[in-house]
Amino acid sequence: EPEVTQTPSHQVTQMGQEVILRCVPISNHLYFYWYRQILGQKVEFLVSFYNNEISEKSEIFDDQFSVERPDGSNFTLKIRSTKLEDSAMYFCASRGFRHLAGANVLTFGAGSRLTVL
Amino acid sequence: DQQVKQNSPSLSVQEGRISILNCDYTNSMFDYFLWYKKYPAEGPTFLISISSIKDKNEDGRFTVFLNKSAKHLSLHIVPSQPGDSAVYFCAADTGKLIFGQGTTLQVKP
């Protein structure tokens, strides 16, 4: 079964450092997402991406965050200067075209755990 | 801004019995609702969805009920199995998914 793959599975970084989290979405999917889950809290939407541009972003997704699809297969999330509160599990997700009568079913990766010290 | 709420952080049931997971929402304009299951060290996986124009959708052991007047949905798992032990998230579909806080289900053998 096709899957979304994320690397690294765990990254530890110092506060103020830049971090890039990588995702390989399912190959025929066209909509891409990043979510995060701070330990013990809910899964929160960060950003959605379609047709090489951001289609929606949350309040969390400030100027420190950026996304890119550099080569047609990878989808990356960059945090320019990490803060302690960026420590979380980051999930990438993708989906294909929505059926006329169907929900937006996102397929999630296993996540990248970011620990900021 | 809690548009989707799961008020029970945990639920424990005996194998073979019914598990009922609840979810409340605030926005009556949501088109679809979805349930996801999450095991430790894995991403959420899609379980079942329901359109806002329906009140029930069934898939094997999993049934989702929607009560629009109460803005409430529930996931029933019958019979519950130990392998169902996981965190269950309900989500509202607005083009992106808005998740609840999750309910940890433990099914005891």
Image (cartoon, grey):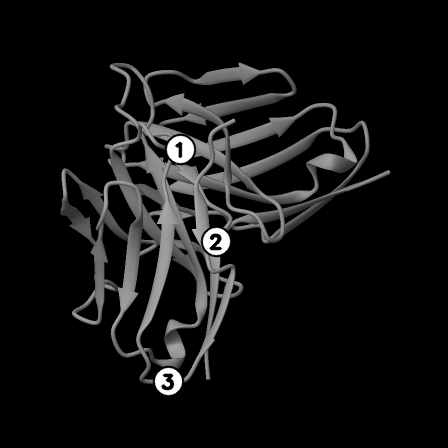
Q: Could you tell me the amino acid type at mark 1?
A: Ala
Q: Secondary structure at mark 2?
A: loop
Percent position (x, y) of residue B81? 76, 31
Q: Chain of mark 1?
A: B
Q: Chain of mark 2?
A: A
**Residue farthest front in this picture:** A71
Residue under numbered circle 1: B70
- What distance separates the C-alpha of mark 3 from that of mark 1? 45 Å
Crowding at dot 3, Cα within 10 Å, few <14 / some 14-19 / many 20+, comes out as some
Percent position (x, y) of residue A90? 42, 58
Percent position (x, y) of residue A15? 37, 85
State the mark number for residue A15. Answer: 3
Q: Is residue B40 left or right of residue A98?
A: right
Quadrant for residue B105, please give it: top right
- What distance separates the C-alpha of mark 2 from that of mark 3? 20 Å
Q: Quadrant of the C terminus of chain B?
A: top right
Vertical relation: B43 (above or below) B75: below
Percent position (x, y) of residue B24? 43, 41
Crowding at dot 1, Cα within 10 Å, few <14 / some 14-19 / many 20+, comes out as few
Q: Are marks 3 and 1 on the same chain?
A: no
Q: Earlier in the sequence, mark 2 or mark 3?
A: 3
Q: Are marks 1 and 2 on the same chain?
A: no
Residue under numbered circle 2: A111
